[in-house]
């Protein structure tokens, strides 16, 4: 049995790195993820963690150092957010292309401009094609657990891809919650020492990330594609093993009161708890709604989304990011998953909670009203809706 602690989300991801016996932590502090390297530095200074903390001159350098350390055979973790993740972007593609199982805790934060330090998913959504697996935590317990599982999934020889664990800025990163922290010996049994297939070794020279001509490049990309597809099975296996070991259940997509629902809200991250409470409240009014929480966004859970879609007449998708000129990214991926289905629900996209704007029961009432009007009409008049806009600011030209 573990120990119950009341901790911030950043602390939860840092303690996960300690429990995972990470060897190297390259980092460049950025709000709201600064507490991660601070906590790691304290662990190392206190002798609680045998690791190297590399304080670099930028996030680009931090990921460059992570790539070098991982290629040399180390278990590597880091943390960043928002503009820091953007500065890492070039190196993210290199890390995945070199098949390095680095794990990063991302404090999901809005992108500039204008400057904003609060929660949305714009930062990680912009890196959804970088070849990194993506997991999204609803609470601090999930942040710790998903970090531990991310190492095991990433290091599996059927996968060998890096992974991001997203936790909502301030809502989770700086909020205190009760968390069950596993014992070190339990984690050691679940997550053995990392044994890389290949490493940089002067006694056995080999090349990582070599020059890829047109005769070879496409096959490298296909192998990454295969690895990401393989990850689906590995994720299910690791989630099941984690539940058997620690008693906490995780699914790529979890459902709540969906069996008889006409409208199903699709969420990611911390809003998922609000969604379940909103479902209960709406059910008391006789409205048949349910909720489904996406935990694994990459690889995208196509099959689970198709199963859920068969139950609903309307999928009401909450996006905390926007792809300008298109829609929200979750909406686009769900649309792609269902495009060849003979019978599919009507899809509505709700752009919501950008820049840390609260998502409330009133917002769920508005989304429900739009969904019910769509049901009555029998067709989608407008697929994308922005929720809780301050119209007085728009009218004033601000």
Image: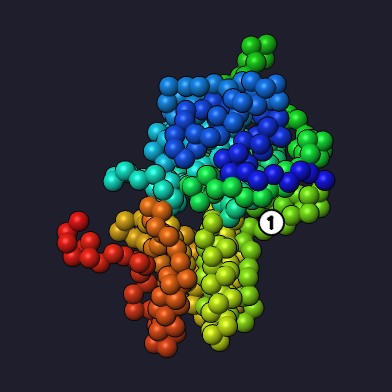
The answer to which image quadrant residue 21 occupies is top right
Q: How is the image coloured?
A: rainbow
The answer to which image quadrant residue 325 occupies is bottom left
At a point 47% along the width and 30% down the height, the residue shown is 29
Of residues 207 and 92, the one drawn nearer to the viewer in this rendering: 92
Left or right: 46 with respect to 208?
A: right
Left or right: 76 with respect to 57?
A: right
x%, y% of residue 258? 61, 75
Mark 1, Cα crowd under 10 Å, few <14 / some 14-19 / many 20+, is: some
x%, y% of residue 289? 55, 78
Inspect this view and state whether residue 126 appears: no
x%, y% of residue 58? 42, 26
At a point 42% along the width and 41% down the height, the residue shown is 82
Inspect this view and state whether residue 285 appears: yes
Residue assigned mark 1: 250
Question: In the picture shown, does residue 376 fall above or below 101?
Answer: below
At a point 56% along the width and 74% down the height, the residue shown is 279
x%, y% of residue 271? 52, 60
């Amino acid at each position: 049995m573990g120990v119950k602690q009341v901790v911030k989300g950043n602390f939860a991801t840092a303690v996960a790195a300690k429990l995972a016996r990470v060897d190297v932590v390259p980092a460049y502090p950025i709000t709201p993820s600064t507490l991660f390297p601070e906590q790691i530095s304290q662990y190392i200074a206190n002798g609680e963690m045998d690791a190297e903390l590399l304080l670099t001159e930028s996030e680009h350098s931090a990921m460059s150092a992570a790539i070098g350390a991982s290629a040399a055979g180390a278990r590597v973790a880091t943390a960043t957010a928002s503009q820091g993740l953007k500065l890492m972007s070039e190196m993210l593609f290199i890390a995945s292309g070199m098949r390095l199982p680095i794990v990063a805790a991302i404090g999901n934060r809005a992108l500039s401009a204008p400057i904003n330090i609060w929660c949305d998913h714009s930062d990680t959504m912009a890196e959804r094609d970088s070849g990194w697996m993506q997991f999204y935590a609803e609470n601090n317990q999930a942040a710790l657990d998903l970090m531990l599982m991310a190492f095991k999934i990433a290091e599996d020889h059927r996968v060998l891809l890096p992974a991001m664990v997203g936790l909502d800025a301030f809502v989770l990163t700086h909020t205190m919650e009760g968390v069950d922290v596993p014992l070190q010996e339990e984690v050691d049994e679940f997550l053995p020492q990392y044994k890389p297939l290949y490493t940089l070794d002067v006694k056995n020279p080999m090349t990582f990330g070599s020059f890829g001509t047109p005769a070879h490049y496409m096959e490298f990309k296909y192998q990454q594609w295969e690895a990401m597809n393989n990850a689906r099975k590995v994720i299910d296996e690791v989630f099941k093993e984690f539940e058997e070991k620690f008693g906490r259940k995780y699914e790529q997509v979890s459902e709540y009161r969906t069996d008889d629902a006409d409208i199903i809200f699709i969420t990611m991250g911390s809003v998922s708890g609000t969604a379940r409470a909103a479902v209960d409240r709406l059910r008391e009014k006789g409205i048949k709604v349910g909720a489904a929480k996406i935990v694994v966004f990459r690889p995208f859970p196509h099959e689970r989304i198709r199963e859920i879609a068969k139950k609903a007449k309307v999928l009401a998708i909450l996006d905390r990011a926007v792809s300008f000129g298109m829609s929200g990214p979750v909406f686009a991926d769900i649309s792609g998953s269902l495009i060849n289905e003979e019978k599919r629900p009507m899809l509505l996209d709700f752009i919501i909670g950008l820049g840390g704007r609260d998502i409330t029961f009133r917002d769920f009432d508005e989304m429900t009203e739009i969904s019910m009007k769509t049901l009555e009409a029998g067709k989608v008049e407008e697929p994308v809706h922005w929720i809780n806009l301050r119209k007085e600011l728009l009218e004033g030209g601000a």
